[in-house]
Amino acid sequence: MEQIIKAEHIVFRYPADTDENQKPAENPPILKDISLEIAKGSFTAILGHNGSGKSTFAKHINAILVPESGKMFVENLDTSDENLLFDIRQKAGMVFQNPDNQIVATIVEEDVAFAPENLGVPPAEIRQRVDDALKAVNMYEYRNHAPTQLSGGQKQRVAIAGVIAMKPDSIILDEPTAMLDPQGRQEVMQTIQKLNQEQGITIVLITHYMEEAALADRIIVIDDGNIILDDTPKKVFSQVEKMKEIGLDVPQVTELAYELRKAGYSVPAEIITEEECLQALENLL
């Protein structure tokens, strides 16, 4: 399978602070020799507690940050080459936690058109891209609304539409549901799954919601700047004790199955959905 994102031995630390004597105090590395590949058309979730390095890694894919050492490639483009920055950000779009920080216009369709206009896309194509992007996130009927009239989940979907209008091959989402209520989170996750499954857009999702990560094809767990787990959701979440050791949870149904096994009941270890849990309980009864 074609690899669309490739990290080779990435090391990164933020600029040095100054100590009380105003002398530079070198910060420890946030990323420590990170190497991985992400396949085209895949849906990868990246987990880690606060400060683990997961968001820092995500910003390397979009070339917001560049490695101290090592290399990051997006479709074989080296993110450290400033001459390629424009091309890289067209290929790998970024969606952040707070949609208000990405919405720049006073009308929804004008906001979605902003990036294509700056790319020099012809007006007729911009119109088509805006319509297609808004339909893809189920926000077409709100195209003439002011973003201020929208809910948090709707704003985030508009922000995603703005990225889609650039026609990227991959979208990196850095905790896009963190500021949303349950309804908003559900709307955004349904949109992400639709883009991946129906349009083949590669998704890299940074999240601290385990139920969201369970929807991915693959989960990468980062702790203290290192990759410590990299497998399917079933394989990763079945390691309940290891996840707890590093301060992470597992889906509630996985936790329930774990407690039942501890109590001596014969329940499968790889339960990550409510349907699987219900079936296991029915089998017990």
Image: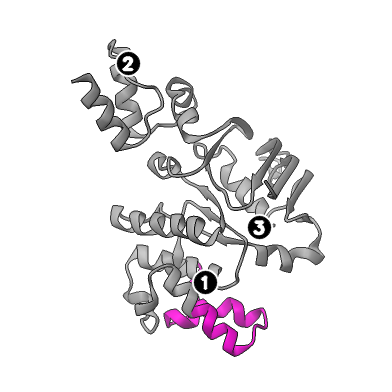
Q: Which residue is mark 2?
A: 261
Which dot, 2 or 1, sits closer to the camera?
A: 2
Magenta range is: 102-130
Quarter holding residue 267: top left
Which dot, 3 or 2, sits closer to the camera?
A: 2
**Amino acid at pointer 3:** Asn
Mark 3 or mark 2: name the one nearer the start of the chain: 3
Does the magenta-highlighted stretch encompass residue 43?
no
Q: Which mark is residue 162?
A: 1
Residue at 57% x, 47% y is 55
**Amino acid at pointer 1:** Gly
Q: CA distance from mark 3 to mark 2?
A: 42 Å
Seen from the viewer's position, the closer of residues 108 and 190 is 190
**Marks 3 & 2, CB-CB < 8 Å contact:** no
Residue at 34% x, 37% y is 273
Q: Left or right of 9: which side holds 213? A: left
Mark 2 or mark 1: name the one nearer the start of the chain: 1
Q: Residues within 10 Å of mark 2 (few under 14, many from 20)?
A: some
Seen from the viewer's position, the closer of residues 35 and 55 is 35
Q: How would you classify the magenta stretch by its main secondary structure?
A: helix
User: How far from the left and from the top, in percent, is residue 39?
Assistant: 64, 47
Q: CA distance from mark 3 to mark 1?
A: 15 Å
Seen from the viewer's position, the closer of residues 168 and 281 is 281
Seen from the viewer's position, the closer of residues 26 and 171 is 171
- In the rendered image, the residue lying farthest to the bottom is 123
Quarter holding residue 158: bottom left
Q: Which residue is mark 3?
A: 62
Q: Left or right of 247: which side holds 2? A: right
